[in-house]
Image (cartoon, grey):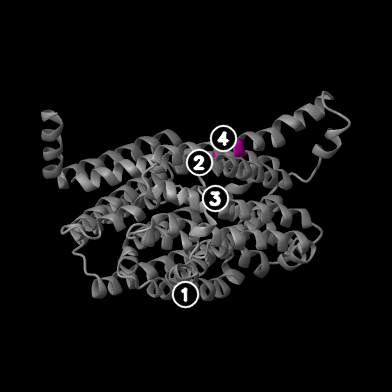
Amino acid sequence: MNPLKKLAGQTIIYGIPSVLLRVLSYLLTPLYTRVLDTAEYGTYVYLYSIVAFMIVVLTYGMETAFFRFYSKSDDPPKVYNTVFLSILGTSTAFVLITIFFSSSIATLVGVQGKSDYIVYFGLILGLDAVSSIPFALLRATGKAARFAALRMVNILVNISFNLLFLIVFPWLFKSGILNGGIADYLHSDDLIQYIFISNLIASAVTLLLLLPSLSINFQKFSFSLWLKLFKYAFPLLIAGLAGIINETFDRVLLKHLLPTDLADSLVGIYGACYKISILITLFIQAFRYAAEPFFFSQANNSDSKRVYSLILTYFVLALSLIFLVTMLFLDLIIVFIGEDFRVGRPVIPILMIANVFLGVFYNLSIWYKLTNQTIYGAYLSIIGAAVTLLLNLWMIPDYGYMGSAWATLVCYFVMMVISYRWGQKHYPVNYNLRKIFTFFGLALVLFFISKLFDSLSFNARLVASFGLFMFYLVVVAFIEQKNLKLLFLKVGKT
């Protein structure tokens, strides 16, 4: 169990800033959904969907390639410098392009007259892409504390400036305390720009704090090594692009396929409810930060496949618990978004289940990375992207964002199943499917049972939900009684 203990510890350490980032972002949602109307919030959601797509382009699979080559290299600094300088060069070119052609790009993406938006997110993307490799180095060298500290700084700066621009300054203007000079610039009805500015400041501060650990050595750049890295990374780029289509492109399609007078508002409602549905990805993201270098480090151990099997089993258990808690106590959780946005509530369980499938897919995807068959990652993501595009194009005109939610669920289910089948052929792992189906299946059953209590009072529903959750814990404890006894005996001896 030592490898599992190590992975759990690293997941917690790496996950703290990642989870807090999402939690604090989630806590900003009540602010955004109250200072922005549904249409303005829809514009914000739409633009950040494009940002998510572009960050994949700018890192082009090099982060995973770095982990793969760094862990087995005789000259790790050469790997680091080759990857970092590659990302630095392409990011610089991208930033210059967005600055010089900002007006044309704004028109192209559908935000005519907002060229400043393009400049802001061009700079944000460039800074974040450059920062990604030093952050990867911290993970690869086990400097989890510094990684967590820098991520926390990024979070706190971003949140602080959001609050400053959206709450403090408006209050100062309204009360007459701040006027003239800089106030003329800061006092604007265009609140979306302040979200971009806050993000930009946070990204710049983070990169500045990373400067002492960049360790740039231009002589260590190797073009021959870069070709090997890119050959490994290119299928991951294709997979990443297809993957981001699966994750965010539904919001882009909603904007362009729905009636113009409704599109932004419906994108805003869907995006706000998506904030709740992706609570489950807090754990997934924390896990991924720790798991990727961990899986590579375990690859040569004789019992690595047994470890991978155990990890997936308890990973699904954790996802099932998060899903069940969110669904049973959704009446409490949903108040964090503005009242106008809560009409989208029916999409939340669909998207939660979809994200469980996505988490399992991420866990299974280690097989093609360990066997250097990353082309299969591209195939899987392309299949998922095709499902996403076809189902969204078919369902959005008739079903709106409900169609997008169901398309997301089907997409991730298909990717998960195909990855499992291919993985068992190329890198067979004896996963405990009986436990996996039991853990998640029981969570689904209890969720559907909870729907029978919808007609009860709020307090009665809470009591019933708590009872269902306790029942789930009792069943899990019964299934895992042998492992729990071993754990308690070990704790007693210490």
As helix, strand or loop, the secondary structure at mark 1 comes to helix
Quarter of the rendering containing residue 201: top right
Q: Are marks 4 and 3 in contact (CB under 8 Å)?
A: no
Residue with the most extreme right position: 180
Q: Position of residue 4 (x, y in %)?
A: 24, 47
User: Is residue 187 positioned above or below 118 on the image?
Assistant: above
The residue indicated by pointer 2 is 151
Q: Toward the viewer: 38 or 384? A: 384
| Relative horizontal placement of residue 292, taking residue 41 as reference (left or right) | left
**Amino acid, disc 3:** Ser
**Amino acid, disc 2:** Arg
The residue indicated by pointer 1 is 382
- Which residue: 40% across, 70% down? 377
As helix, strand or loop, the secondary structure at mark 2 comes to helix
Q: Residue 22 shows which numbered tag?
A: none
Q: Nearer the viewer, mark 2 or mark 1?
A: 2
Nearest to N terminus: mark 3 or mark 1: 3
Q: Nearer the viewer, mark 2 or mark 4?
A: 2
- Range of magenta residues: 155-159
User: Is residue 172 positioned above or below 94 on the image?
Assistant: above
**Amino acid, disc 4:** Leu
Distance of label 4 from label 3 (alpha carbons): 17 Å
Magenta-colored stretch includes residue 142 = no
